[in-house]
Image (cartoon, grey):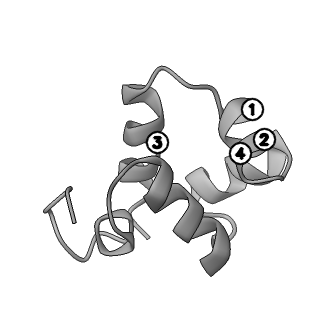
């Protein structure tokens, strides 16, 4: 997964890891592991992030550079 993209999207909205973790119903520590690439993001959480950032999972996964679906 393109970890930089995930962090950039969060920072573009001036959000903390704790705020995104709450959205995903997880801990800040767990979310930090997603951004660092230590743990893979479950598909259901990836889907939530795509909806939240108004993009698609392919963009989050680095499979395309087209941000809008």
Name the mark on residue 23. Answer: 4
Residue wearing tag 1: 18
Rendered location of residue 43, percent (x, y): 61, 79
Helix, strand or loop under label 3: helix
Circles 2 and 1 in contact, beta carbons < 8 Å: yes
Q: Going by the image, does 53 lie left or right of 33?
A: left
Residue 8 vs 45, above or below: the answer is above
Of labels 3 and 2, earlier in sequence is 3
Q: Residue, x 36% and y 51% (percent of image)? A: 54
| Cα separation between marks 3 and 1 | 13 Å
Q: Residue at x 29, y 66 (%)?
A: 59
- Label 3 belongs to which residue? 7
Looking at the rendered structure, the number of numbered marks drawn on it comes to 4
Category of crowding for the residue at label 3, using alpha-carbon neighbours closer than 10 angstroms: few (below 14), some (14–19), many (at least 20)? some
Mark 4 and mark 1: Cα distance apart in space: 9 Å
Q: Which residue is mark 2?
A: 22
Q: CA distance from mark 3 to mark 2?
A: 16 Å
Q: Earlier in the sequence, mark 4 or mark 1?
A: 1
| CA gap, disc 4 and disc 2 | 4 Å
Q: Is residue 42 above or below residue 68?
A: below
Q: Position of residue 20 (x, y in %)?
A: 66, 40
Neighbours of disc 1 within 10 Å: few (<14), some (14-19), many (20+): some
Q: Percent from the top left, x then y, of residue 67?
A: 20, 56
Q: Nearer the viewer, residue 3 or 27?
A: 27
Q: Are marks 4 and 2 in contact (CB under 8 Å)?
A: yes
Q: Are marks 3 and 1 in contact (CB under 8 Å)?
A: no
Say if mark 3 contacts mark 2, CB within 8 Å: no
């Amino acid at each position: 997964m393109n970890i930089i993209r995930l962090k950039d999207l969060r920072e573009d909205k001036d959000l903390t890891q704790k705020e995104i973790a709450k959205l995903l119903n997880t801990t800040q520590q767990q979310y930090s592991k997603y951004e660092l690439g230590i743990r893979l993001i479950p598909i259901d959480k990836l889907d939530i992030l795509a909806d939240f950032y108004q993009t698609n999972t392919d963009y989050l996964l680095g499979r395309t550079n087209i941000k809008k679906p």
